[in-house]
Image: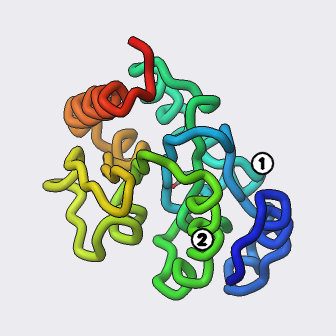
Amino acid sequence: MEKMDWDTLELACRSCTQCGLCATRHNVVFGVGNREAKLLFVGEGPGEQEDLQGIPFVGPAGKLLDDMLSIIDLTREDCYIANIVKCRPPRNRDPQQEEQAMCFPYLDNQIDLLDPKIIVCLGRIAAQKLIAPDFRITSQHGHWLYRQDRWYMAMYHPSALLRDVYKRPETFDDLLSLREKLRELGMRKD
Ligand code: URA
């Protein structure tokens, strides 16, 4: 796919019919946040609320993501938020490899336009696509990887934290580590 500017990319994405997910979607969930931000969060794919509203992370997991951001004094205006697939997989199943592959050029183009210094993967699916195919979220969350001029880290997906509160302390540590990295890179003043 040829690289596009934001508006052209968003238009192309919103009318995409490249995989079967387009048949059941209500809205394409392109991404939200600050297009000048150097911090990118990547989730897995839209859930029910996201599909209905066309905005990432607006359901229960999204509320928790907002709380997680606020723990380190971040808001959606300090970052950009996108997903591996832009259309909701039916019944929130994992997006299939082929769906991920068809959709990836949109995220890749978003990454190109943003040129983030930090990419935080939310959950296994995003980490396996962006960090390593064999990424193990339970043992590798919170680890930093520097590759091609940017830093990568994965955290538990907020949905996992809703299901299992015992994962929350580890995520708190990962958030503090993110705050430290932002400081280290001169991306925050405190
Ligand atoms: N889960 C995700 O991975 N992304 C969303 O946008 C919402 C829930």
In the rendered picture of this protein, how many numbered marks are placed on residues?
A: 2
Q: Amino acid at mark 2?
A: Pro
Q: Position of residue 24 (x, y in %)?
A: 74, 74
- Taking the view exactly as shown, the residue that stands out farthest to the top is 190
Q: Are marks 1 and 2 in contact (CB under 8 Å)?
A: no
Q: Quadrant of the C terminus?
A: top left
Identify the residue under disc 1.
53
Quadrant showing the N terminus: bottom right
CA–CA distance in space, label 1 to label 2? 15 Å
* Ligand 1 within 8 Å, label 1 CB: no
The residue depicted at 67 percent of the width and 38 percent of the height is 34
Q: Is residue 88 visible?
A: no
Q: Position of residue 115 (x, y in %)?
A: 55, 53
Occupied quadrant, residue 22: bottom right
Q: Label 1: how many residues lie within 10 Å, few (<14), some (14-19) or many (20+)?
A: some
Q: Which residue is mark 2?
A: 89
Judged left or right of residue 41, residue 32 is right
Left/right placement of residue 14 relative to residue 80 reads right
Residue plotted at (78% across, 77% down)? 16
- Please tell me whether residue 142 is drawn above or below residue 26 in the rendered image: above
**What secondary structure is marked by label 1?**
helix
Residue sitting at x 14%, y 55%: 139
Dot 2 surroundings within 10 Å: few (below 14), some, or many (20 or more)? many
> Which is nearer the eye, 35 or 89?
35
Residue 31's disc number: none
What is the image's colouring?
rainbow
**Between residues 59 and 98, which one lies in front from this camera angle?**
98
Is 31 placed above or below 36 here? below
Position in image of residue 127 (x %, y %): 35, 62
73 sits to left or right of 12? left
Camera-side residue of 2 and 154: 2
Hey, what amino acid is under mark 1? Gln
